[in-house]
Amino acid sequence: MAHGSAIAIVLAAGKGERMQSTTTPKVLHEVAGRALVHWPVVLAHEVGVRRVIVVVGHGHADVEAALARRFGDAAPEIALQQQQRGTGDAVACAVARLADGPDNARVLILSGDVPLLRASTLHALFSCTGPLAFIATRAPDPTGYGRVVRDADGRVLRIVEHKDATPAERALDEVNAGIYAADLGFLRRELHGLSAANAQGELYLTDLVARAAAAAPVATVLAPFVEVAGVNDRVELAASDALARRRIAERWMRAGVTLRAPDSIAIDADVIEIGADTLLGAGVALRGRTRIGSGVTIDVGCVLTDTVVEDGAILRPYTIATSAKIGPRSVVGPFAHLRQGSELGEAVHVGNFVETKKTRLGRGAKANHLSYLGDAEIGARVNVGAGTITCNYDGVAKHVTVIEEGAFIGSNTALVAPVRVGQGATVGAGTTVTRDVPAGALVVSRAEEKQIAGYAARKANAKPKSR
């Protein structure tokens, strides 16, 4: 079910003092690799809401920049709450941007610190009629939450905030989750009449519930507490992260992915794809916008960030890849490091303790041991021997090494860029290459070998020098 005509308002202006953070706004702390404020925006898009407004306040420049980076052209609109005057004022800041909206437009009000809300719960909220509806929950400890007050017949009368509640009201365990659906016309009419005459001296959005109830029944959707609980400190942040990651792991397992020791595997919420029959070993972390093909093996301890792995590839233990592309049936690791801009073609082998950066390896190329390949173009079927280094930095600028198709690079070779090794050429072990090597040529540069017979015996019989 899509809700394309609806509008979502995300409240993300609070400071979040209990996070004890001096540099990071509360809503930019992450759950499953995704900033808290990104979760409700993604959810709104998921249920088909096209127009999203995020109300920002504390650290607003950082929050706005994070939203722009994550969503690009689909970034939400921004409404700035200049002073922290309560949730009613925050919503009013967003409604002020909706002068062009019809009164019957449905407005979804979400919290920027509730990451675990499900789309099915929002769809249920959308189906409620009347000027206003909201999500309620049963809290194990309702301290601090607004209580839902009902009459003897179970009809909602109002929400009373904890600090304003009587002892009898505080004994209620049904609480407000802070998530609403309301008609835009109702918000326009009623927000301006809110009063700060309460224990906190704020404009409570919850006061609208009593106004709506006076005109028509107020519908509620009851959701599990863990789904709608807000994140207020780092203990709750960790708990939400664990629950989110468990949900993510279960979703991929049901889609045909094998997770060994799933509680040890960390798959970010924004991972795009993991193909069927892929296997993830214990301790694997998939971060950012990573995309994994089918039939891939990613063994113990691998960490992939914003990386593409194509069908049938094998990543041996403790491979690290960032903004890299690994071609089909390639074999990488163990202990390989593919840095930004690394691209491996089909059936490429990059072995243990090999590091690449801004380097492309063509089909069937091999670099199996202890090498650094930076700023390099390596052709098909090239063999790079152990200990090879592309000397790409001269202290001022980076330079490119080109190794053409079928070339053989001997062990312990230094290629001083910019330099080109021609097709089918051979570089002898221990060579330092400073000039282009023609196709089919052999290049060797070594100091003359000198052997001294009897050296070990003379060394053993030598008298130690006096000090």
Image (cartoon, rainbow, N blue to C red):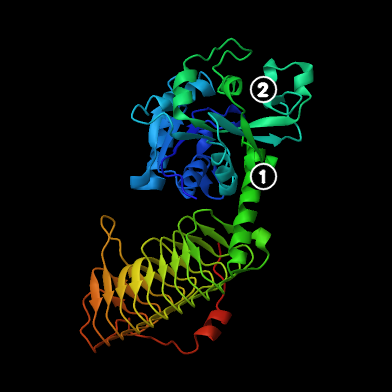
On the image, numbered disc 2 is attached to which residue? 157
Residue ID at (62%, 65%): 253
Give the alpha-carbon distance from disc 2 to disc 1, as whole Å.
Answer: 33 Å
Residue 144, visible in the rendered structure: no
> For residue 52, what is the image quadrant?
top left
Q: Where does label 1 land, which residue?
A: 239
Q: Quadrant of residue 149?
A: top right
Q: Which mark is residue 359?
A: none
Where is residue 36 shown, x and y percent of the image? Answer: 53, 41
Q: Residue at x 45, y 71 (%)?
A: 354
Q: Nearer the viewer, residue 267 or 452?
A: 267
Camera-nearest residue between 222 and 293: 222
Q: Amino acid at mark 2?
A: Leu
Q: Determine crowd level at label 1: few under 14, some 14-19, many 20+ residues with C-alpha closer than 10 A.
A: few
- Looking at this view, is 16 or 82 the one in front? 82
Circle 1: element type: helix
Decide if residue 217 is in sight here.
yes
Callout in the foreground (2, 1) = 2
Residue 66 location, x and y as percent? 42, 41
Q: Position of residue 34 (x, y in %)?
A: 51, 47
